[in-house]
Every structure is written in structure tokens, then in C-alpha cells.
Amino acid sequence: MKVTWEGAGRDGPGWEELSPRAGRCRLPVWDCTAGLVVGEDAALMVDAGSSVREGAWLRARARRVLGGGRGAGSGQRGGVGRVTHLALTHPHFDHVFGAAAFAGVEVFGAVGVERVLDRGREELRADAVRNGADPDEAAEAVDLLVRPRHLVAGGRTLDLGGGTRVRLANVGPGHSGHDLAVLVTTAGAPDVVFCGDLVEESGEPQAGPDAVPARWPAALDRLLALGGEDARYVPGHGAVVDAAFVRAQRDALARRFGVS
């Protein structure tokens, strides 16, 4: 199965190819990354956007890549057809509020993220509105918040078929109390690591009230051990970077927070 990564169109941004089986979309407003990993038997979305509306748009655009929707006929036949798995890298509104649009998929998150989504709903709504989200859309997303069914304590491997494997790794805390990284391995292609907001390229890494600064550098050490020197690292916000960038950001965070 050949994957055709659809570019930008009149209805919004397109997919940036990261490897033959992994792509990402940089969503508008907050420049938040959403990833898509395509196997022969299953497909994984990484993060879900900042609203139910944005999540629904992502799911529809993913179906067009996967062979289940309009445009699927151009270079793509016999695809899996739809997103089957969703990984949430951390519990911030711009990454989780769209999850309700992915009804029927298997949802994964770092252990502990379920408590934030159960007990921290009002703060998530307020944070979204403070950052410019539509109040009605934020309230809708909070009402429909999805609690991950699969909680990752250490690591978990998913075989998506066709030589594409995904390693979900609980590498935090750091940017939040519950940071999940996603390593994509495809035969014959460089590894790809979706970092969530543990790494940011478009600005200085943001440390909100739920960040754990003293442990953030160690989380990036674990991230680098996961991907290695030759992987492509995909920040939660900004352009794709290499291991040297991640290491430099790790050292800058250690200086900023006074930790080793």
C-alpha cells in the first residue's frame, strides 16, 4: 500500500511527509502538531486538536489519506480506511479537546492523564478560553472529554502491519505531569519521534503550572535514548528537528531551571 500525503487545500493545511508511513499536520492558531501513522492493518493519530470541530476535520482528512474518503482513489487503494488508534501526548487543551471526534478508536495516554481529564476539566476549559479558544467550543469539548482506555506506565508497542511499528513511551514528567512520546519505526526509513510539547521549535518551551521543571531535562534524556541520533524529532509546535536540537534544548532547560 502506497501512502499519498495530501497537501494543503481550500479546507485547511495539508500533511507533511515524515517517512513513507508517517506524516503530520500543523494545525492553525496554536501551530499544534497532529500526527498520522499508517500501517497495513491499523492507523494511529497522534493528538487530536483543540476542539471537537478540529478533531472532526482531522479525522476526515486522515480518512482521505487512509483510503476511506473523498480523494482516496489517487494512489491509495486497499487502505485501512479509518483511524483505529489515538495517542494523546499530554493533557493540554490544544492536544486533547478534539478526541471526542474519534469515537470508536482505541485511546492511549500516559498513566495519570485520566485523573487530569476527570478532575481538571474546569481548569482545562478556563485555560483554553484564556488562550483564545471559543468559549462555547471549549465548553463542548470539556463536556465530551475522552478518558484514555489504555494507560501507559512504561512502554507499549503497537504493530500496525506492513512493517510499521509504534512504541508508546511514558518519558515524563516534564512539560506536564504525564508526557507520552511516540516512536515510529518503518522498515527502510528513519525513525520518527512525536515529542508532544517536551520539545518546541517555534518558541521557548512553555512551562505552565503543571510542568515539572526539575525532571524535564531527564525526560529529554529518555526521549533521546528512545529515538537515537538518527531519528527525526517532531515537536508539539514548530518544525521537525534532529537529536542535536533536542540535546541543546535539554541543556537550555537545565540551565533555565537550575538542574543537571
Image (spheres, rainbow, N blue to C red):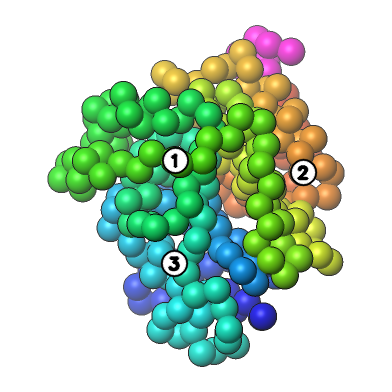
The residue beneath circle 3 is 13
Q: Position of residue 105 (x, y in %)?
A: 44, 56
Q: Secondary structure at mark 3?
A: loop
Q: Against 236, is 126 above or below?
A: above
Extreme-left residue of the structure? 136
Q: Nearer the viewer, residue 176 or 156?
A: 156
Q: Quadrant of residue 101?
A: bottom left
Point out residue 238 in the picture as x, y percentages from the top left corner: 55, 48
Residue 177 image position (x, y, % from top left):
51, 23
Q: Quadrant of the N terminus?
A: bottom right
Amino acid residing under circle 3: Pro
Q: Which residue is under mark 1?
A: 148
- Magenta stretch bounds: 254-260
Q: Residue at x 66, y 52 (%)?
A: 158
**Mark found first going from the N terminus, 1 or 2:** 1
Residue in view at x 69 percent, y 47 percent: 157
Q: Position of residue 189 (x, y in %)?
A: 80, 64
Residue 97, by quadrant, is: top left
Q: Going by the image, does 92 lie left or right of 125? A: right
Position above or below: 258 against 141: above
Instruction: Give the CA distance from mark 2 to mark 3.
Output: 27 Å
Looking at the rendered structure, the secondary structure element under dot 1 is: loop
Q: Nearer the viewer, mark 3 or mark 1?
A: 1
Residue 126 seen in the figure: yes
Residue at 42% over, 51% down: 48
Which quadrant would the C terminus be assigned to in this image?
Answer: top right
Amino acid under disc 2: Gly
* 96 lies above or below 252: below
